[in-house]
Image: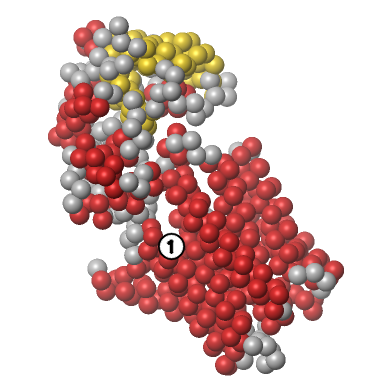
Amino acid sequence: MNISTSFNPWFLILVGSFVAGACAYVGSLMVLKRMSLVGDALSHVALPGMAIAISIGISPILGAFTALTIVIIGIWYLEETSDTYPEALVGIFFTASLALGLLLTKESDLLEALFGSLDKLDFAEGLITIAISVAAIMIATFLYNKVIISIIAPELAKVSRINVKLVNLAYLLLVGTIVSLGVRFVGTLLMGALVIVPAVSARNVTKTITGYLWFSAIFGVVSAAAGIFAAAKMSLPVGAMVVLTSMVIYVLSYLYHHLRK
Amino acid sequence: MPDSILTVSDLTVVKGKRAILEKISFEIKAGETLAIIGPNGAGKTTLFRAILGLIPFSGKVVWKKGIKIGYVPQKLFIDADFPLTTREFLRLKDKETLKIKDALEAVGIPMDKNLLNNRLSDLSGGELQRVLIAWSLLGDPQVLLFDEPTAGVDVVGEGTIYSMLEKLRVKKNLTILLISHELDILRKYVTQVLCLNKEMVCFGLPKDMDKNVMNKLFGEEVRYYEHQHKF
């Protein structure tokens, strides 16, 4: 939970910034889709995957990713074929996953899964994490046109020959990917903050979509960098400090928004 | 004889066990303007969705080969502070500034106007409608489909939008299909009328759609100018 003194905090700040930037960038579209809490709920799905990964000694990121991918495909399939409201579906999967996760996770590992375990990140894992974060931002940039049209005018999207179902699946899988990276940092309980808070702050300071996407990413990066730095200096839990930093940015953006009016 | 743009025969759409549209047949030729009118719940939007291929149907819908269709939806799903400017919205469809300029000029919006830098959610009903039309023009369509072009626009604005559509039709050689509930305002612009309600369907020239037909269609005395728009 706390950063061990043996690890280079600058490397953690670098990796953390990439992850938080990617989470915020991809998550900003989630907020526009009015699915903010889906991102949060999905992080709980990561728990059983992480538990299994830890118990068989592989990277928890891989475990989280596998669990998320399975559940996302399940949710997507049910959303397309049944009449149940997507949020309710996410609710079903997320509580079931959390229950399963609690059964599978050893008590000693539970805190780590719930609140993150940044200090256990090794160098190779860090580099892979950075690479995946960059790829996630690139894929989101490629998709965002289509995602936005399908949010504001679903029929227009279909008439423009956008495969809305496929775009939704691709986007959800992207969310799954960034959530698996993020849970390693802040844990499943605080993951929602990385996806939601920077986007909501960005919305306070800009009225363009380009500004919104980039401010989201920048706020994510600043939250991670400042949060991890403060956590290292004061020997405090990383996840909590990152989330609280993003809250400070949110309050500042709120004040800016209201003072400017 | 101008080409047939769209031929619909025996179009039936069933939802659950209820037929929303039953055996609808009509034909539109190049350069025509068709108004689809009828009370709420008559299946007007369903008809649009079916001919656009967005929902399953039985019967035949045949578009002229290779035709480009522009669709203008009734509304957008945007919250009050959705971060998307008019310029960005149009650029989602086409990044070429010159084409955007042309499309905006066609709907009477000068390129230098602040409107382009305003959020889409800050536009008035009439402005948004024009921007949506400009969006559909960016794809160089030969046919335009409008779902209630004047929903959310005041009575003065309604007339302006219809006369603008007429100018566009002539200038860009368009065929127009539109859904409306106000035949009287658009009577002078349309060449064909398709009326729909649960019991009856009629297809004909605007002059045939007299008061009797309208009363039968809407089930009451129709008062075009007296209803109030609430915002």
Q: Residue at x 63, y 58 (%)?
A: A176
Locate residue A104: give its quadrant. Answer: bottom right
Q: Residue at x 31, y 70 (%)?
A: A257
Q: Chain of mark 1?
A: A
**Residue B134 % position (x, y):** 28, 39
> For this view, does A126 lie left or right of residue B189?
right
Point 59% across, 89% down: residue: A232
Label 1 sits on a secondary structure element that is helix
> In the visual, does A68 lie left or right of B111?
right
Residue B191 x, y percent position in the rendering: 25, 14
Q: What residue do we see at 55% from left, 87% from top?
A: A229
Q: Residues within 10 Å of mark 1 (few under 14, many from 20)?
A: many
Describe residue A123's horizontal placement relative to residue A219 as left or right: right
Residue A252, horizontal then vertical, whole percent: 37, 77
Quarter holding the N terminus of chain A is bottom right
Judge whether residue B220 can be spotted in this image. Answer: no
Rendered view: B168 above or below A246:
above
Write down the quadrant of residue B64 in the picture. top left
Can residue A78 be seen from the camera position used here? Answer: yes
Return the residue at label 1: A213
Up/down of A32 relative to B59, above or below: below
